[in-house]
Image: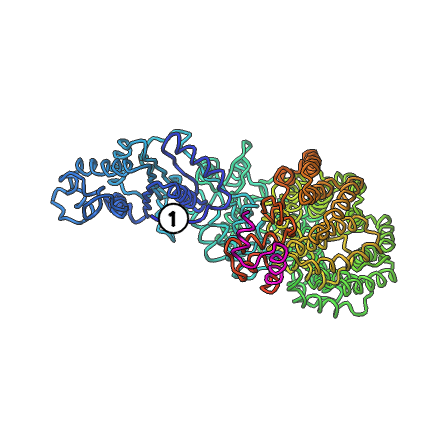
Amino acid sequence: MTSAAYRAEPVGRAELLARLDRVLSTGGRALLTGPPGVGKTEVALSAAARAEARGETVLWLAALPADRGIPGAAAAALIASVAALPAQGPGPEGDVLADLPGPQRAAVAMLCREAPMPDGGWDPVALRLAIARILRTVAARGPALLVLDGVQCIDPASADLLRFALRLAPPGLRAVAVDIPAAYGTGGDPSDGGTGPRATAEPLWEPSEADVLNVPPLQADEIAELLIHHRLPARMAGRIHKASGGNPRLALAVGRSLADARTPVHHAESLSLSGRARDLARALLGAVPPDVRATLLLAALALRPSASLIRRAGRPTAEADLAAAERASLIRLTEDGTVAFSAGLLPSTLVHDACWTERSSGHAALAGVVDDPVEAVRHRALATDVPDEGLAAEVSAAAETARRRGNSTLAAELALLAAESTPGLHGPQRIARLVDAAEEAARAARADLAMRAATDLLARDASPADRVRARLAVLDTAGQGLTDLDEIYVHAMEDSEGDTALRAAVQLRLAVKYVLADGDPVRSRAAAVESAALAASVGDRATAAKALTVQARMDRVLGSPDAERVLAEARALERVERPLGVRNAAQILTIRHAMFDDRLTDARDQLGALLPLVERRGSVEDAIELFRTLAEVEARRGQCSAALAHAGRSLALTLEAGLSPGPAWYALALAETAGGSFARAASYARRSAQASEEEGDHVFLSRSLYALGRVQLLSGDVATALETLRRVQTGEHAQATVDPSMLRWHEELAEALVAVDALDEAEALLADVRPVADRLGRTTVLLGCDRAHAVLLAASGCPDEAASLLTEVAERYGAAGLPLERGRALITLARVERRRRRRSAAASALQAAAAVFERAGATPWLALATESPTPPAETVPPRGGALSALTDAELRLARLVGQGASNQEAAAKLYLSVKTVEARLTRIYQKLDVRSRAQLATALNS
């Protein structure tokens, strides 16, 4: 097979592939195992691609379920793959088969149906020896890898032949077998020809414990990468991971199902899937017999399933059934017997496919044996489809109990169940409970429950106030994705007419929408001002505080000097009202303003005091917000390990909760840029940009593109960085952003412009931002502008002035408590000093930068400081003589042209126009006193 036949390295399998290489190198045999869809074949394909890239011969045998019943089918397929190998000698089929002795060649011909089969069949001894000789001959040509995919489907006759041949194979022939546990049958997936459970067959070789490699499920972050690779919505990664349990095939099926249905991320919690995803779940469940599935149905219906609970509910063989399910990788059993399904889609499918009688009987049985009255009421309500006011009241009380316990998700489910259990004759009571259910769902971030409650309510004769409250609950569960909800806003505005308090609440939601979904801070501020005024007029201090917070945020964006005053007003109201959460509150915005101002110690101290309270009593959204902000603060402070830890925690909580990961990926991109890896930082920034784009979130789209452009510039990819940072510039201008401290893209874009010799544009950009930063008192923004201006000075032929400015900038960054920025200024200084041919000063600056980065744990920056002081973007060797008259940008172009590049090719490579290249070449010719490309090449090499 050629390398084109193999796929790229599968997502999340680098460590497993390295281990597989080690196992094959030491023992020559490896067995890949795991449930269907986990990616065993993908790993084997990648291993084969690696082997072929090393020049090894690769034999690939993929057995199908239908092959199991055809004697010799797999052996014949193996011989066919050998026959396809390039010949190394004379003979119609190459030297491997042509050199077989007569009886062995005859047996092979019979097996492959190339010769008549005698009544007694082929000679088994001759055929055994033939297969063994074929493999030995292949191995004699050089290292070889035999991949046996679908071992469970190999027919018994072929298995016997391969078993014998592998025992006699030389060490030069390594083998990888791909198998699934016996519980899954010959294929596991009926759509692929699976046949259900199979008997355990004798293995092709006796594997040692070290030979067996279990292919594990992917982690949530790896599922996100998989979705991006397949152009599926990455914003759903957390929920898709929970639904699939990390099984790649199941995750892709779930992702495609949700994408095809155009399911908003905030509605995906209910997993109302069909088609391929459900079929795959049914295939996995089909690995166990019906009795075991009946036991699993009870586990799916219970809130806290355990072996003892299921046994008491009427399944005396619960332990044995659950053990069988665990062997099939459907569940995990803890030591105390607690049951956890390996994928969320499995219990969902069990319940989905069960008839009403089965579900009702299961809930009735569980209601009598659970030890929690809240759970008992839930099961009793779900066991009947007859509305009952008494039962509905019990469920409503149970919802209140769950709320007091802090179980917001269960409280939301019970609140809706109480409403749905209320008889239609009790119309006002049912409507009141539906409103409560919608608002409870909003507190639990369960958009699917909020939508169900609102849909039921809006179909009834509800008052305008109740309709508004239900719609606001739906809006509050939308998270970052507010782009498809315009109709809800319109109806909420209509129904709030004449109700000042409700109109204030609607205007507050509109203020958020205008900035996130529409990217319009001016309109957002206007809505926030109106909301605050309306709320204050009716004494609603909670809504007024929230509206003033949004106003303060927009004032900061728009560069208004009133931002801090308005924020102080909001904070004062919050101290009186004591809001339940901190997300989008004045308290967290106060901290973020401190971060924007580089008052980082103050910001960190406030976050540190707040975090224990949020971890004890706050919502998961509050915790995510705090960890994300902490990561940003610590990355800016140069506390790299802390930044990585906080960003990782934010992402883990985000994915676990099934929320959009765009903001968490942005924080991780910043943390990785500070102390991890530039490559990983770019990867996370790209993911954040994609998720934010999917959500229509303009704010985090700009932030993630800034993080990406910055790391591209630091990595030396100037052309791509320039393109990315121009997108940031366009987006920020479209959003009318004025304050340069909130996203410091100006200095990065200016440096990228200098790198492509767009000096006038860089100078104009810095001239535009300086007065604004000066007026608003953004001192560290001015420092960034000074660093970029120094780069501009150096490129303009003023290295002495550039060095003096950079020395001052580095000192001031150190005084401001920004070590990474100080180190960056020192690296830039080293490059300028080298240009001044002051090698000792350059080395001293680099050493100082390396010391800064080493103390901070800034791994990628330390790598920059220990490399040549020439910027990565330039990759320009040292120059002397006449070449020292050239700017860095001119020297890059000169070397490209000297190597034979045309003007058009050089323009494309350097991200310039052809006219710019022509003008720059004219200056180069003048400075070097040459008149042709040939003379230029000679001058460069002299």
Q: How many C-alpha atoms fall within 10 Å of the one at disc 1: few (<14), some, or many (≥20)?
A: some
Residue sitting at the far left: 119
- Quick check: can you spot residue 790? yes
Q: Which residue is mark 1?
A: 3
On whether residue 930 falls in the magenta region, the answer is yes
Q: In this view of the protein, which residue sits in the foreground, 774 or 763?
A: 763
Q: Which residues are magenta?
A: 917-942
Dividing the picture into quadrants, the one containing residue 726 is: bottom right
Residue in the image at 84% along x and 63% along y: 534
Q: Is residue 29 above or below residue 730?
A: above
- Residue 58 place in picture, x, y as percent: 33, 42
- Residue 166 place in picture, x, y as percent: 29, 34
Please state if 125 lies on the left or on the right of 499 as rendered: left
Element under label 1? helix
Please state if 222 lies on the left or on the right of 112 as rendered: right
- Quick check: can you spot residue 404? no
Q: In this view of the protein, which residue sits in the foreground, 337 or 364?
A: 337
Dividing the picture into quadrants, the one containing residue 219 is: top right
Q: Is residue 458 above or below residue 721?
A: below
Please state if 123 lies on the left or on the right of 357 as rendered: left
Residue in the image at 58% along x and 64% along y: 914
Residue type indicated by callout 1? Ser
Q: Main secondary structure of the magenta part?
A: helix
